Image (cartoon, rainbow, N blue to C red):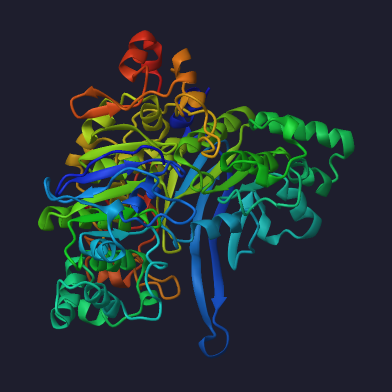
Amino acid sequence: MTTEQRVVSDVDTSKQVALVRIEEVVKHFPIGAGLLGGQVVKAVDGVSFEVRGGETLGLVGESGCGKSTLGRVIAQLHPATSGHIYFKDIDLVTLKGEKLRRMRQQLQMIFQDPYASLNPRMTVGDIIGEPLTNFHIARGKAREKRVNEVMRICGLNPGFISRYPHEFSGGQRQRIGIARALILNPTFIVADEPISALDVSIQAQIVNLLEDLQDEFKLTYLFIAHDLSVVRHLSDRVAVMYLGKIVEVADSKQIYDNPLHPYTKALLSSIPIPDPDLEAEREPILLKGEIPSPVNPPTGCRFHTRCPIAQFPICSEQEPPLEDKGSGHQAACHFPGQL
Amino acid sequence: MDGVSFHVDRGETVGIVGESGSGKSVTAMSILRLVAEPGRIAGGRILFGDEGKQKDVVQMTDDEIREFRGNDVAMIFQDPMTSMNPVLKVGFQIKEAMAAHERFTPKQAQDRVVPMLKRVRIPAPEERAKNYPHQFSGGMRQRAMIAMGLSNEPQLLIADEPTTALDVTVQAQIIELLRDLNRDLGTAVILITHNLAVVASLCTRVIVMYAGRIVEEGSTRQIFKSPQHPYTWSLLRSIPRLDEHQHEKLLTISGLPPDLTNPPPGCKFHPRCRFRVDRCLEEEPPLGEVDPGQKARCWVLMRNALAAQPQQAGQP
């Protein structure tokens, strides 16, 4: 099933329809009132891309690049400062009240920390079933039946319905979080680092579960992670983010085989491979320094301060737009593919 | 942690791999006798030094252990922010680390601060020495910790998840730094991590721990190319790889790591092992040699398991 779907999506990606379209989304957080007032953290600073129906779009970047903020803005947990988020061609930014609430049913989120994202005083049944009550979909026996069903789908024993989160391991708690996201039959799920807090031997269980659920329920994922190996494994397409901007978007295979942006290339080359022979040959491109502050991002291309191939003054003055460099492979760089 | 024995040669880089609760950090802490109450080293020996004039860390007096820590062996931790004093300047803390021992005079110690920061590639080391830890980024703090650890020229550096809190591009810088320091100064490194790929990148020998025991040990090549313990074998197949060519389902290890207050009888991995035989349920296997330089704690061994069930070999 998985392979079949992926083959199809490889062939006619161009025909696939955008389920979510993000246009020029900006999210700024004001900081430091008083004397320092007026400063803002430009967490997401003008981002456009689309997530196609039935695909997994991987969103990668280092800490502080704005990927989690972007995920939360798309999932309507933070209001966008400006820009548009179209879900099935309806702009969520303009929706209010009951209409927005209705849309939210189709739009769910899975969080990174399975310890912090579950209310410790609620039973697992209440946590998973709460959305059914909130949306007046089911009560009493009908609710319990649906909770049972979703628990089974997510690999949880329905016999544990009356237990509390602390009685579960990290991997099981993440299954509870997934069951809660799934219970309203959503079409689109934003998964923010759903496996990075789990033990290595548990991660594969959750990765496989997410894949199985996608096949079974035709889900569309925005999968946010810093681990490029996992993103490669799960994603049809990948968007790379740096300091509030998308620097490259392409099919998973293109991104990994032929990265055009020097940041993507450096990021890929920094990942060690669990194979000593390949490791001996691998020569990482070591970037200078660390990601600059999003309060005061560099002028021009935001990556120019760390870029091994930056040319001056163009890279420090002109911001390169995110453009198609051929066959749908988008990159924001004045010198794509030259590293 | 129960009956762990291993050795680290002069100048060697050894990786200790395991999940949380496998005992890998406790093992490292024991080398410095830093096990927190109510834990204790109930038995065994920790020998340090050349053959013939080895010192046993377990028998050392308090004065001896203080000299040993820092002077012979240094340790760096996952979160450098909690291991530095936030109200003292970084340069001062490095100097203090040297002043605590008698290898250098106060003058020498002062003069060594900037070169040490330079050695770990902190840009503008003169100015940076006057900064406080919070003015450093995460990667720079880890570098400063390494500078502090190496300031007394120890023979062994124990790095406990040194890159876990860092981004991948910064992780690559720190791995490169540890590799260079090992090569240039001959400092032996024990790298404790859950990340197998980092081990493949830096270490020449690997120790795999599970439920407080060493379950497999060998050269990096042996462990990654021909793992004999089912836990090692499964772990390697459960992680997605950047160089994977086709989409394959990941192998999952069922169940959870055992509760160490109530470990299972027999082999501690048997409840999660797909290759177990009856004997595994009752009798714990010894850590036996399977090849020159490679040991595994298993009654079955992967080479026999795969020969008996060849269909498993094709599985991802």
Judge whether A273 appears above or below A9 on screen.
below
| Farthest bottom residue in view | A35
Judge whether B117 appears above or below A106 on screen.
below
| Farthest right residue in view | A140
Can residue A261 be seen here? The reply is no
| Residue drawn at the location 38% of the way across and 67% of the way down | B83
Q: Along the horizontal axis of the image, is B3 left or right of B264?
A: left
Can residue A48 be seen here? The reply is yes
Across and down, in percent, residue B160 comes to 34, 53
Q: Residue B255 falls in which quadrant of the image?
A: top right
Across and down, in percent, residue B272 comes to 50, 26
Looking at the picture, tell me which residue is in the foreground, B67 or A195.
B67
| Farthest top residue in view | B308
Q: Along the horizontal axis of the image, is A277 left or right of A206?
A: left
If the image is split into quadrants, where does the C terminus of chain B sit?
top left
Across and down, in percent, residue A14 comes to 48, 37
Numbered marks: total? 0
